[in-house]
Image (cartoon, helix red, strand yellow):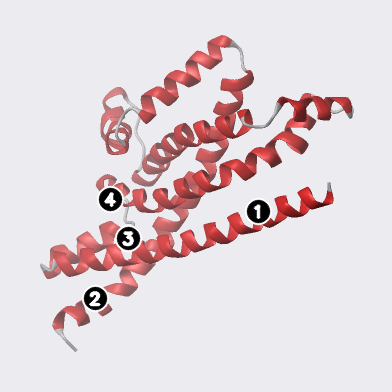
Amino acid sequence: MPQWLQLMADSLPSLLYAGAVFTVPLTLLSFAGGLALGLLVALIRLFGPRPLVLLVRGYSWLVRGTPLLVQLFVIFYGLPRVGIVFDPFPAALLGFVLNVGAYTSEVIRAAIASVPKAQWEAAYSLGMSWSQAMRRAILPQAGRVAVPPLANSFISLVKDTSLAAVLTVPEMFQAAQRIAATTYEPLMLYLEAAFIYLMLSTVLTWMQERLEKRFDRHVASVGAAT
């Protein structure tokens, strides 16, 4: 076996372990937290009082207008200057949640706004409250519109978690960096890490396409029934 191939075979378990223990949990927790935050921000933007609207708009403007890497550095390396200290993993998680929340809020806001007002009126005519109308009528329809961009955000987040390496989080890319530092073979190891990210993204893209087709079939069946 060629030396470079042996190196990649030897390093693969370490990269997969780092991915399973740190990359995957960081991605799932960040997306779940960011999605919840994005929904809250979107609802405030659409229905909240003006002071809160201005506050969340400022948050979205700030986060979407600055690089994610800079945000991570501010949280992990900058905040200790004012007495706020985070361990590497919580710092990365906070940064990703805030970043995902800002972007998903725009997706969710646009999706909710795309639901015709007649749907609200129909829900109210059935005696639903605002929260019931939102939960039973509006969000299910908005979800169909939001699924593709939200899925794209999730796939992007999988790759963005590699930035956690700069905060010393021992995720998959930092595992590749550590091995490269001892073997002096950065090219092969970085290509191996890139290939793993590529495979993850490919699988997630396939799952996204399946999910969208399932939604399309559901919408078609509902349309035929009505």
Q: Considering only vertical position in the picture, is 116 above or below 164?
A: above
Q: Residue at x 21, y 67 (%)?
A: 189
Q: For residue 17, what is the image quadrant?
A: bottom left
Residue annotated with mark 2: 8
For mark 4, give the secondary structure.
helix
| Foreground: disc 4 or disc 2 | 2
- CA gap between label 1 and label 2 equals 41 Å
For mark 3, give the secondary structure.
helix
- CA gap between label 1 and label 4 equals 39 Å
Which comes sooner in the sequence, label 1 or label 3?
Answer: 3
Nearer to us in this view, 44 or 89: 44
Quarter holding the N terminus is bottom left
What number is the disc on residue 172? 3
Q: Would you say 162 lies left or right of 156 here?
A: left
How crowded pointer 4 is (Cα within 10 Å; few <14, some 14-19, many 20+) is rated as: some
How crowded pointer 1 is (Cα within 10 Å; few <14, some 14-19, many 20+) is rated as: few
- CA gap between label 3 and label 2 equals 14 Å
Residue annotated with mark 1: 216
**Outermost residue, left direction?**
184
- CA gap between label 3 and label 4 equals 8 Å
Q: Considering only vertical position in the picture, is 225 above or below 73?
A: below
